[in-house]
Structures are given as C-alpha cells and as structure tokens.
Image: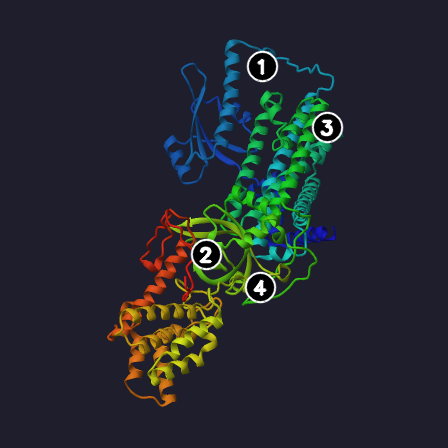
C-alpha cells in the first residue's frame, strides 16, 4: 500500500505543480469572480452611458406619454423640431445615437420609424417598441371605452395549479430546485470525466512513451499504479473544484448575495446530496478505469485522443440522454437507460432528483454499477499490466486481447520483475525479488517455443520468446517519427521487425548483441515474413539466457573445417602459392574460422566464412576432376583467399557490421594489399603474386557486382562461378527451409527478388555437409 500512496502522491503533486494546472485554475477563478459580480462589472464599464435618441413627433401628442413609458436607465429621449433629413444627418455625424419618427396610422393608432447608423443594437429599438405597444394598448382601450379595471381583468392570468397525488411527490419549489441540482451535477460529471479522464490517459501514455513505465513496473505493481493514478488525478480534480467553490462562495458573499438562495437548494432533502455524491464518485471511477486502461495501450501521447474517443462518446451519449430526460424523466427510454451502467450515474440520479424512484430500482442500479466497476477493474488490471509494456502501432481491440494474454497465466498483483535495458551490449540492474511478468507468460508453451526456430513461424502465429538483435537500423517514418528496423535472430535464422516511435533511450537500449524478450505476431509484408512487435524488453540475468543460445553456427565444427582447409593447402604443389596462402591463413586463423561470410544474404552465421570456403573447395576439387586443365594450386588458393579480407571488412562474428576499412576499402582491395604485403614479407616475387591478386580482384565477375577487373584467367572464371553457385544454393536452401512442400518461398532480394517453389512430390532433406560420403 505504501507504493500505492507513493504513486497517488506523486501524481497529485506533479499535476498540482504543473504550470498548465495553475494557469487554468487561475483563469477559471477569475471567470467565476467575474460571473458572480457581473452586474457591478457591467455598470463599472458602462457607467451612465445611455442611448440618446432624438424624437420627431408628427402627431404632437405621442411624445409625452411615450417618455413616461420608456426606461430612462437605458434611453434618453429628446424632442426636436428639425426636419427629418437634417436629423438623419445629425445621426450620421454622431450627434444622436438614433432618430425616432412618430406618426399615426389610418386608424389613429401610433406607428414609428427608427433610424440609426447600424441596427446591431437591438436593445434600444425593442425598448421603444415595448413602450409604443403599451401606448397603443392604452389608446385602443380608450377608443373602446374600457376602464382600467376592465383592462386589468382582461390581462389577468388564468388560475392554474399543479397538485401531485403521490405520497412522496415533490412540491413545485422542490422540483425546480431538484431540476437545478440535477443539471449542475450532470454538467459537472460531464466536464469532470472529460477533463480529468483524459488527464489519466495522457499521464499513463506520457510515462509509457518516455519509457519511464519500464522502470516503474520493476518497483510498483501495475494494479497499484493504475489506482494510484486514478486516485491522484481525482485528488487533483477535487482540489481544483474545492478552489472553485471557495472562490465562488467568497465572490457571492462579497457581492452581497445569499449563497444558498443564489444556488436555490435550500428546500432539498439531505438524501439527494448523498445520492449526488455516490453517483458522482461511482461514475468517475467507472470511466477513470477505462481511460487508464486505454492510455496504457498507446505508445505515443498523440494517440491518446483517438484511443479514448469511444469512451468519450459514451459520456456524451449519457449526457445527451440526460438532457432529454430533464423534460421527460418518466419516459420508458430514460427509465430503461438508467439501468445501463455507463449511463446510470447520470440518468438514475436524474430520476431520483425529479421523480419518486422505488428503492429496489435504486438498489438494483447501484449493484449493477458496482459489479460493472468490479469487472472493469479486474479485466482492466489485466489489460493494464500487459499494456504498459506494449509498444508499436495502435490497434485497440487486438491490443486489448494481446495485453490480457500477456498477463493471464499465474500472475499475482505486482508480479513484475526488474527491467535490464541493454546499453551498447552491457546491462545495468534494478534490484527486485520478483519474476518479470513476461518471463512467465505462456510458461506452458516455453519448451515448444525454444525448440521452434523463428524462421519456422507462419503468418498469423503468435510469438513470445527471446531473440538476439543482429542489427538495428534507424529510420524516419512518413509521420516524421523515428523507428528502428531490427533484425532478430535465433539459431534457426533471422527475421525483420519494426519498432515504431522510438526514443533516444531506445536507440541506445536496443542495439546489436542485445538479447530481448519479444511478443508479437508474424505477418507478410511485401512477400516477406516480418515480426510485428507488440511488446519488447531487454533480457536480464533471471532469464538465464546467453548470446550463445541464439547464434546460428556452421554445420561443421571448427577443427573439422580447419583440417579440411589444411588438406587442400598441403595438396598445392607450387611453393610460392602455398607459402602465401599458409602465411595469410595463419595470420587471420582465429577470425577466419569464426566470422560470417557476409552480413546478410548468404553464410551470415558463426563460422560462415570458413564453411563457405570448405564448400567451395569441394566444388573446386570436383571441377578439377572433370577438367584436368585447371590449375589446382591457383584454384584452391583463390578459394581460400578470395573472401579472407572480410575478417578486416567486418566487425566480428556476432552482429557483424562493416568497419571503417570495410566501408572505405572493401574486402577485395584489402586482400589484394594483404597478398602484396605477404609476398614482400616472404621475399616472393613473380607472376604468382599478380595472379593471386587477380583471382581476388575478379571473383565477383563484373564491375557492377564489385570486381574492379573481370576474370581474365581460366581459374578466375571458375572461381567466380563456384563462389556464385555456393552463395546462391545456400540462399535458396535457406529460403526453402522456411516453407512446406507445394509452397513458394518469400522473395529473395539477392536473387532478382524471385520466389522459389518447393516441389510437393519431393522430400527435401537438410543439405548435407561438404565432404559427406552419402
């Protein structure tokens, strides 16, 4: 509970000190003071200003009676004898505010024309019209010979009384006051929920978008966070309302008005105020839980408004029905809607305030409302637990389902463990003795997921497992927000994933060689499988995972491949070629047997470079057997040396990226230089050195494929073919491994963006190791 009070207090204090809160409160207080003193303010600014109207009386008898009828607080009449045109000019020049021309119609009754520069001011003409109407009535009565008593009787209202027959029915005065109280509460609840409910959602989304939530969940159980924020914002709102009430009370006292008479609630029973408080609090709690849950599902503050719009529409619908119910509180529609939990706080209180509601109906409504709130709290807590750790593009209904799945298995309140964000391959730790919620999610399927590689998931399947970040590339989305393209891998292979709306901390946290726990689903994007991330977090020691668990390795062991390569070196007969090859292999032996052959497309796994070379040596041996004219020394040396420069071009065996030398020089130029240095070191001169350099320069085949020179030696041409063949067969095999017989692979970009078909009648086995006797 201490953590609950800590969250509530932090939320309350933060919001209370916010400049926006202080400015809004101050402005609203000024408005309240202004409304309470509106009459003195108007008088202060208007002073003794009156509308000065010149009057031309063509009858000679209407001006005197008219002057007695007109309110002199608003209008000052002056009778003039000027000509009408001259008087109009005086109005145009500003001498008079208006000109009234009086005359008689054919029946001898008053008529008038009012002239002014503009007719925007409607108050003066209406006052003159009222006075003339009374004058006309008096003249008409005189013509008909009616006395004053007869006129008074004529305009006397019809006696009409309303009598309620029910025992507990409200009197007319009580009903008017109750209607006023109901309207005040409806409007207050409407504004309260919209203003402060949105504040709850925004508060959650703000912490989540800044990744503060990842730190909070390691220390404070999410349910305590949920209610801490709800109560904290409620206290903020109550504080603001108390300030408003105190200012209004003081302003009314200062203006000399009786507060309760001004409010008009002095004849209402105390029970109605109790009901007002109960329904107000229940209504707030009902909607506050919804707002907090929806706020936990969005990753960006700007997504809050679309996310909470459905709830806001419920509030608006309840308010509109209540406005209708003010005039028809006993209608069947209002009665039925008052039992709907989302409408009950407004509509049931409206009925209690205006009509006599049986006690069982009130009790049933409160039970339904309390049960709904309890269910929302129960399911809302589940959604909130998972939602606060979910990032990515918003899809409310799918996100709700996913968030519940993240927390449904064997979870206790607050079963969140620590977050261990990776920063450049390292980790820092937050102490906790609890298990992370994501660690135990889907615990019953953990063993199956470990056995199933990421490349074997199909479209629509849910993923919840640990993966290694192979590469992370920053991009800018069409909305201007940064995102990361992650290549995630395990021992089976890799898959692309997008992490949207990343912060600078994310860019430091989710880097190559960082192990992450990822939840999401597989979808097809432009013919290629992609992982749609729903939640992601760095791994921590309690997860008991190692980088080695996720690294795809060559099918052959290091010692086995070393023995094979040395076998081909010893088969060379030219001493110069053999010495240069042995020298360079020994110089870079460790890296050669650990590095991948590329960052992507082919042999991009641990020891991929050596495995690629061993496969090519087997191909070269077979071709030499078929074509004895090929020089085995040149071909074997070319195979071993052609990609050896990649140990300098690439950064390392794991999450390989291009080094500075790799970006500026490339492995071909690097190896040509290394051959030259080796020959110089060994004191070797002659044509062999140049031919070896040419083999490396030409092994890509064409300039547009990266070779400065095309193959001009027979062995260089063959080297190009077997390099290309082994790389392409490997790419095709890896693509076919992901599909079932009778299906096409995803498009392979490096192979002209083609898809390959896996024949249904063939049982394609796993590719055999080079040198296998089978």
Q: Position of residue 494 (x, y in %)?
A: 46, 58
Marks 4/2: CA–CA distance: 19 Å
Query: In the structure shown, which secondary structural element does the residue marked by tag 1 occupy?
Result: loop
Q: How is the image coloured?
A: rainbow
- The reply to whether dot 4 and dot 2 touch (C-beta < 8 Å) is no
Q: Position of residue 503 (x, y in %)?
A: 52, 59
Marks 2/1: CA–CA distance: 89 Å
Specify few, some or many for label 1: CA neighbours under 10 Å numbering under 14, 14-19, or 20 or more: few
For discs 4 and 3, the disc positioned in front in the rendered view? 4
Residue 751 relative to residue 13: left or right: left
Nearer the observer, 289 or 137: 289
Residue placed under numbered mark 2 in the picture: 495
Marks 4/3: CA–CA distance: 71 Å
Q: Which mark is residue 268?
A: 3
Q: Position of residue 21 (x, y in %)?
A: 61, 50
For discs 4 and 1, the disc positioned in front in the rendered view? 4
């Amino acid at each position: 509970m201490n953590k609950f009070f800590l969250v509530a207090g932090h939320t309350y204090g933060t919001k209370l000190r916010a400049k926006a809160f202080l400015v809004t409160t101050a402005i609203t207080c000024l408005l309240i003071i202004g409304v309470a003193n509106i009459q003195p303010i108007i008088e202060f600014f208007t002073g003794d200003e009156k509308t000065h109207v010149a009057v031309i009386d063509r009858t000679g008898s209407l001006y005197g009676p008219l002057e007695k009828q007109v309110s002199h607080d608003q209008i000052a009449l002056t009778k003039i004898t000027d000509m009408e045109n001259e008087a109009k000019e005086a109005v145009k020049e500003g001498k008079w505010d208006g000109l009234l021309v009086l005359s008689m119609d054919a029946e001898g009754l008053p008529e008038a024309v009012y002239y002014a520069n503009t007719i925007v001011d409607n108050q003066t003409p209406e006052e003159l019209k009222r006075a003339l109407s009374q004058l006309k009535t008096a003249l008409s009565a005189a013509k008909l010979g009616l006395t004053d008593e007869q006129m008074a009787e004529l305009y006397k209202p019809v006696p009409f009384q309303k009598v309620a027959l029910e025992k507990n029915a409200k009197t007319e005065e009580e009903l008017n006051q109750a209607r006023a109280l109901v309207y005040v509460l409806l409007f207050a609840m409407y504004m309260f929920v919209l203003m402060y409910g949105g504040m709850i959602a925004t508060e959650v989304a703000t912490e989540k978008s800044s990744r503060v939530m990842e730190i909070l969940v390691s220390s404070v159980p999410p349910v305590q966070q949920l209610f801490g924020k709800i109560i904290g914002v409620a206290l903020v709102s109550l504080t603001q309302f108390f300030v408003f009430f105190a200012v209004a009370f003081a302003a009314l006292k200062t203006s000399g008005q009786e507060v309760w008479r001004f409010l008009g609630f002095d004849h209402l029973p105390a029970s109605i105020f109790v009901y007002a408080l109960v329904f107000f609090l229940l209504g707030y709690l009902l909607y506050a839980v919804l707002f907090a849950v929806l706020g936990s599902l969005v990753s960006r503050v700007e997504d809050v408004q679309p996310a909470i719009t459905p709830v806001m529409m419920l509030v608006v619908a309840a308010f509109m029905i209540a406005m209708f119910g003010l005039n028809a509180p006993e209608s069947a529609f209002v009665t039925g809607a008052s039992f709907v939990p989302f409408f009950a706080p407004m509509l049931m209180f409206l009925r209690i305030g205006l009509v006599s509601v049986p006690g069982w109906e009130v009790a049933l409504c409160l039970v339904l409302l309390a049960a709904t709130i309890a269910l929302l709290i129960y399911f809302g807590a589940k959604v909130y637990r998972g939602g606060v750790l979910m990032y990515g593009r918003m899809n409310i209904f799918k996100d709700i389902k996913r968030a519940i799945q993240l927390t449904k298995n064997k979870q206790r309140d607050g079963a969140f463990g620590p977050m261990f964000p990776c920063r450049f391959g390292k980790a820092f730790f937050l102490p906790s003795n609890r298990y992370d919620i994501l660690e135990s999610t889907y615990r019953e399927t953990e063993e199956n997921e470990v056995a199933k590689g990421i490349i074997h998931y199909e479209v629509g399947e849910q993923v919840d497992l640990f993966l290694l970040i192979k590469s992370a590339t920053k991009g800018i989305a069409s909305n201007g927000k940064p995102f990361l393209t992650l290549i995630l891998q395990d021992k089976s292979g890799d898959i692309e994933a997008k992490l949207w709306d990343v912060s600078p901390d994310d860019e430091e946290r989710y880097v190559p060689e960082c192990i992450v726990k990822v939840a999401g689903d597989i979808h097809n994007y432009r013919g290629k499988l992609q992982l749609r991330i729903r939640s992601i977090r760095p791994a921590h020691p309690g997860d008991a995972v190692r980088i080695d668990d996720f690294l795809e390795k060559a099918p052959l062991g290091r010692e086995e491949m070393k023995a094979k390569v040395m076998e081909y070196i010893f088969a060379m007969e030219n001493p110069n070629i053999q010495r240069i090859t042995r020298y360079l292999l020994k110089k870079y032996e460790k890296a050669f047997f650990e590095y991948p052959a590329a960052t992507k497309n082919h042999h991009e796994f641990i020891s991929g470079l050596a495995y690629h070379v061993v496969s090519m040596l087997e191909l070269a041996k077979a071709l030499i057997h078929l074509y004895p004219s090929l020089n085995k020394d040149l071909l074997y040396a070319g195979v071993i040396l052609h990609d050896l420069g990649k140990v300098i071009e690439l950064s390392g065996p794991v999450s390989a990226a291009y080094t500075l030398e790799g970006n500026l020089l490339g492995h071909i130029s690097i190896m040509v230089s290394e051959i030259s240095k080796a020959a110089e070191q060994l004191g070797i001169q002659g044509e062999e050195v140049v031919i070896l350099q040419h083999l490396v320069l030409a092994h890509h085949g064409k300039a547009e494929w990266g070779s400065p020179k095309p193959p001009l030696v027979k062995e260089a041409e063959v080297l190009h073919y077997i390099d290309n063949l082994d790389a392409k067969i490997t790419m095709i095999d890896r693509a076919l491994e992901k599909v079932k017989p009778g299906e096409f692979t995803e498009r392979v970009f490096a192979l002209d963006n083609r898809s390959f078909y896996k024949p249904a009648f063939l049982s394609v086995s796993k590719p055999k190791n080079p040198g296998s006797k089978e």
